[in-house]
Image (tube, rainbow, N blue to C red):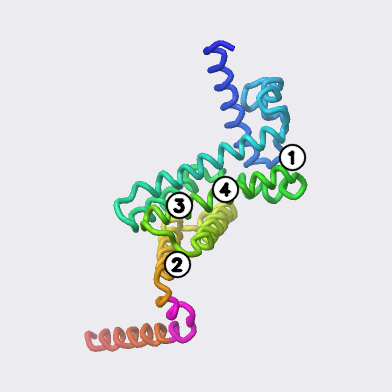
Amino acid sequence: MGRERRQKSEVSRERILDAASELFAARGYAGAGVDRLAERSGIAKTAIYYHFGNKEGLLAAVLERTATQWIEGILQASREGADPLGHLDRALAGMQAMLEERPWIYKLFQILTLEVAESKPEIAATLRGIVRRAKQAIVEGMRDAIGVDVPEADAIATLILAALDGISLGLQLDPDSVSLDQVFTDLRRATSILVAIRLNPAIMQFVDHPPEQLGLLGQHHSGKERDDERSDDTDG
C-alpha cells in the first residue's frame, strides 16, 4: 500500500470513529446501525467492515480511542501546575473542560455500561480496563503533584471518578441545576482534604467524629448570626 493510500485509509478510519462515537453516545449500541453510521460518516459499509471487522470491533476501537484521549487529557493537565495545589487545580480543570466541551465522552461510557457490558463480556472487559487506566492516571497525577505516594490513593481516584459520573448524569437530566464551577470547587476541596488525611492521619480525628465537630461549627455559626443581628440593631 502506497503512502498516499495509507493516509487516505487512516483519514477514513478516523472519520468512521468520529461518527461512531457520536452515534453510540446519542443512540446507544443497538441504535447505532452500520447503515446509519455509513451515511453519517460518508464512508462505505465495506470500508467499515474492512477497518474494524464488525460492529463490536468498531465499538472496541471507539472505546480505546476515547479512553486514550480522556486519560491523556487528565495526565497532561495535572502536569501543568507550578505547585501541588496548582497540579490538582489543572487536573480538575481539565476534567471540567472535558465535561463542558465533550460531554458525550462520559455519556458514551455510561450508556455502554448499562446497555452492552452485561451481554458482551469482551466489551465489559474493555470498560473495566478503561476505569483501571483512569484511576491509575489520577493516582499518578497525585503522586506527581505532591512528590510522594499517597496512601490508599486508589480509593480517592475511585471517588473522583464516581463524582464525575454523577456530575455527567446531572448535566444530562437537568443542566440548569448544575453549576460546574461550584461543583469542581467543592471537588477540589474534598480531594485536598482526603489527600491531607492520607498524609497526616492526625487530621482524621476531626473527620471521624463529624456529629460532635459539626455541632460545634453550628454553634459558632449561630453565635455569629446573633452577633450580626445585635450589630444591625445597634446600627439601626
Q: Earlier in the sequence, mark 4 or mark 1?
A: 1
Tell me the distance, in whole angstroms, between the alpha carbons under discs 4 and 1.
18 Å
Q: Earlier in the sequence, mark 4 or mark 3?
A: 4
x, y (%) of residue 16? Answer: 61, 28
Q: Earlier in the sequence, mark 2 or mark 3?
A: 3
Magenta range is: 204-215
* Local SS, label 2: helix
Q: Which mark is residue 47?
A: none
Residue highlighted by disc 1: 30
Q: Is residue 232 left or right of residue 5?
A: left
| Residue shown at the point (68%, 41%) measured from the top left | 27
In the displayed image of the protein, which residue is found farthest to the top?
A: 2
Q: Residue type at mark 2?
A: Leu
Q: Nearer the viewer, residue 142 or 109?
A: 142
* Local SS, label 1: helix
Q: Nearer the viewer, mark 2 or mark 4?
A: 2
Tell me the distance, in whole angstroms, between the alpha carbons under discs 2 and 4.
24 Å
Residue highlighted by disc 2: 194
Residue highlighted by disc 3: 140
**Which corner quadrant holds the C terminus?**
bottom left
